[in-house]
Structure formats: structure tokens, C-alpha cells
Image (spheres, rainbow, N blue to C red):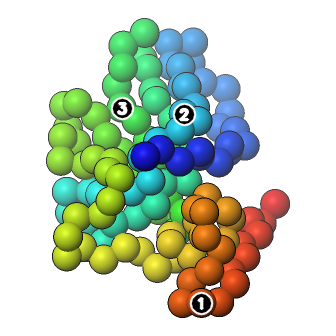
């Protein structure tokens, strides 16, 4: 199952001509790092290329943290449909993803939730 990701406003200045990024529109909902104490929900993602060669994928998470995946260095970081058994989900990510409508339900513990990002 893939979820639709948020579109981020570009915050970087001019990038070198060799550097190219492609914004991803869909991804699996959970990001797990090799050093994770909890699973996070993915808010946005970009694939990065240098001189036409794939280098890594970066993720922005709903709680404000970021994560990376590359074929060489971050092999144990991954995206998944469901968090691993026994690994808790970040409450901030879960609440904001629910409130922003990324998930089908707008209820947590039976109460309506709503998230409005700052502009």
C-alpha cells in the first residue's frame, strides 16, 4: 500500500548542474532506520542524482526529522507497509499524518483530529 506524499516548497538555493532531484509522489507509509527506537511516517521524499547516477533518497518525516536510504551506505534503512512488530510508531508522526488526511480515518482514540501545517 502506498500513500500520497506532501509536496514540499523548494528551500535550497541554486544547485550545481550535476545535481538533480526528483520529488516522489507516492511511497510506502513507514520509514525505519537501522538505529530506530520507533517507526516514523513519511511526509515527502526526493531521489538525488549526481551526474546522472543515483546517489540516495531522502525522506522528510511528519515529526520534523529526516531520513536517508542509499544502496551503499544505508542498506538497513527501509520503507514498509506496516511497522515491525514490537517497534512503536512515533506519536507525533501518527497524529499529524492522521490530522492532515493522509490516512483514511481522522480519529485517534475515538476523537476527531485535525492538523494544519504552518505556512
Would residue 35 appear left or right of 31 to someone viewing this image? left
Compare marks 1 and 3 and give the one earlier in the sequence: 3
Q: Which mark is residue 24?
A: 2
Q: Is residue 107 above or below residue 21?
A: below
Task: Name the image quarter holding residue 70.
Answer: top left
| Residue 82 % position (x, y) | 32, 59
Judged from the image, the secondary structure of the residue bearing numbered disc 1 is: loop
| Residue 57 % position (x, y) | 40, 35
Going 68% across and 43% down the picture, which residue do you hit?
7
- Farthest residue, direction right: 119
Would residue 104 appear left or right of 117 to someone viewing this image? left
Compare marks 2 and 3 and give the one earlier in the sequence: 2
Judged from the image, the secondary structure of the residue bearing numbered disc 3 is: strand
Going 81% across and 60% down the picture, which residue do you hit?
119
The alpha-carbon separation of the residues under discs 1 and 2 comes to 32 Å
Mark 3 packing: few (<14 Cα in 10 Å), some, or many (20+)?
some
Residue assigned mark 3 = 56
| Residue 104 % position (x, y) | 60, 63
Residue assigned mark 1 = 110
| Residue 96 % position (x, y) | 60, 71
Would residue 33 appear left or right of 23 to someone viewing this image? left
Q: Considering depth in this image, is 47 or 81 the residue closer to the camera?
A: 81
Amino acid at each position: 500500500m502506498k500513500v500520497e506524499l506532501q509536496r514540499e516548497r523548494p528551500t535550497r538555493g541554486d544547485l550545481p548542474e550535476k545535481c538533480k532531484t526528483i520529488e516522489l509522489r507516492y511511497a510506502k507509509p513507514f520509514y525505519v532506520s537501522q538505529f530506530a527506537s520507533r517507526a516514523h511516517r513519511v511526509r515527502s521524499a526526493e531521489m538525488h542524482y549526481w551526474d546522472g547516477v543515483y546517489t540516495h533518497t531522502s525522506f522528510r518525516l511528519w515529526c520534523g526529522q529526516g531520513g536517508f536510504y542509499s544502496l551503499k551506505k544505508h542498506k538497513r534503512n527501509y520503507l514498509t507497509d506496516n511497522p515491525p512488530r514490537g517497534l512503536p510508531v512515533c506519536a507525533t508522526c501518527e497524529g499529524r499524518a492522521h490530522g492532515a488526511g493522509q490516512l483514511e480515518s481522522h480519529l485517534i482514540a475515538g476523537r476527531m483530529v485535525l492538523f494544519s501545517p504552518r505556512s
